[in-house]
Image (cartoon, rainbow, N blue to C red):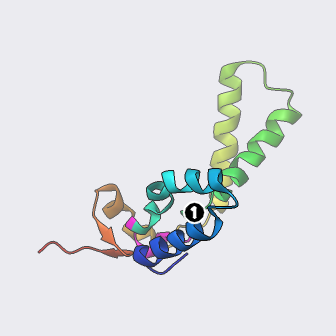
Amino acid sequence: MAPTKKEANRAFDLFATTYRAKYPAAVERLEKDRDVLLTFYDFPAEHWVHLPTTNPIENTFATVRLRHDKTRHNGSRTACLTMVFKLLENAAKTWRKLNGSNLLPAVVAGVIHEVGIQKIAA
């Protein structure tokens, strides 16, 4: 959670140097995925808090999984899909908006962000 991608890369290098001798396979795997792990720096800074976690996905499907187990796996495919849709539709009523939700159209349109700030074309 460094403030800039440059500082994150510096911290990443320090981590790799410190732990390579003790955990070579883990460090190798992290280095292989470095670009993916630091991709969130290419999005608006307001979105950073939401990107490094899968918790919203896990919480959303916990409700669906619980109901699916209670109804003994819902019979037909159509019945299952209908139930999942209605559960998610109901759960969506309590979700809060993302920080910087007004910036989502720009992200979808492919606007480039550097260090969390929209890059202005010269």
Report the side of 46 relative to 68 (left or right): left
In magenta stretch: residue 84:
no
Could you tell me which residue is drawn at 46 percent across and 64 percent down? 40
Q: Quadrant of the C terminus?
A: bottom left
Q: In the displayed image of the protein, which residue is found farthest to the bottom? A: 3
Disc 1 crowd rating (10 Å Cα; few below 14, some 14-19, many 20+) is: few
Q: Using the rendered view, name the quadrant where residue 96 is placed.
A: bottom right
Report the side of 92 relative to 121 (left or right): right
In the picture shown, does residue 83 fall above or below 21?
above
- In depth, the one of 119 and 71 nearer the eye is 119
Could you tell me which residue is drawn at 86 percent across and 27 percent down? 72
Residue 52: x percent and y percent? 57, 63
Q: Using the rendered view, name the quadrant where residue 80 is placed.
A: top right
Report the side of 87 relative to 1 (left or right): right
How many labels sit on residues?
A: 1
Q: In the displayed image of the protein, which residue is found farthest to the top? A: 76
Q: In the displayed image of the protein, which residue is found farthest to the front? A: 21
Q: Quadrant of the N terminus?
A: bottom right
Residue 99: x percent and y percent? 51, 73
Q: Secondary structure at mark 1?
A: loop
- In depth, the one of 108 and 20 nearer the eye is 20
Report the side of 48 relative to 60 (left or right): left
Could you tell me which residue is drawn at 46 percent across and 71 percent down? 9
Please give the residue where the numbered disc 1 appears in the rendered image.
52
In the picture shown, does residue 40 fall above or below 117?
above
Residue type beneath disc 1? Pro
Could you tell me which residue is drawn at 42 percent across and 73 percent down? 5
Residue 95: x percent and y percent? 63, 62
In the picture shown, does residue 3 fall above or below 30?
below
- In depth, the one of 122 and 83 nearer the eye is 122
For the magenta stretch, what is the residue range?
42-49
